[in-house]
Image: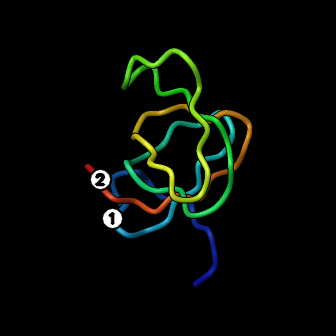
Amino acid sequence: DGFWIEASAESLQVGEHFAVKPGQRAAADGLVADGSSTMDESLVTGESLPQLKTAGSKVVAGALNGTGLLTVSATAVG
């Protein structure tokens, strides 16, 4: 309904949008719906350099967000 609520990652379902604030880790796999930032995926992919994420980019659960705010649409949870 256009309002953000704070909820646990366990309650997130495919298709729902979630925010990834600066310095937070992504709660689920998904696609960036809005925003721009770099994400450190080294824990998951081994890539040592932060990767730029913009609308349509894939996000991997556990990736660490840089300085931007991202709105992500969940594609895989759990």
Q: Position of residue 36 (x, y in %)?
A: 68, 49
- According to the picture, the residue beneath numbered tag 2 turns out to be 77
Tell me where residue 45 sits by quadrant: top left
- With respect to residue 62, does 19 lie above or below? below
- According to the picture, the residue beneath numbered tag 1 turns out to be 13
- Left or right of 77? Residue 2 is right
- Left or right of 69? Residue 28 is left
Q: Count every numbered label the image shows and give the total.
A: 2
Callout 1, which amino acid? Gln
- Write the residue at 50% across / 51% down: 57
- Write the residue at 33% across / 52% down: 10
Q: CA distance from mark 1 to mark 2?
A: 6 Å
Tell me where residue 16 sits by quadrant: bottom left
Q: For the residue carrying disc 2, how many other residues have a C-alpha within 10 Å: few (<14), some (14-19), or many (20+)?
A: some
Marks 1 & 2, CB-CB < 8 Å contact = yes
| The N terminus sits in image quarter | bottom right
- With respect to residue 71, does 9 lie above or below? above
Q: For the residue carrying disc 1, how many other residues have a C-alpha within 10 Å: few (<14), some (14-19), or many (20+)?
A: some
Callout 2, which amino acid? Val
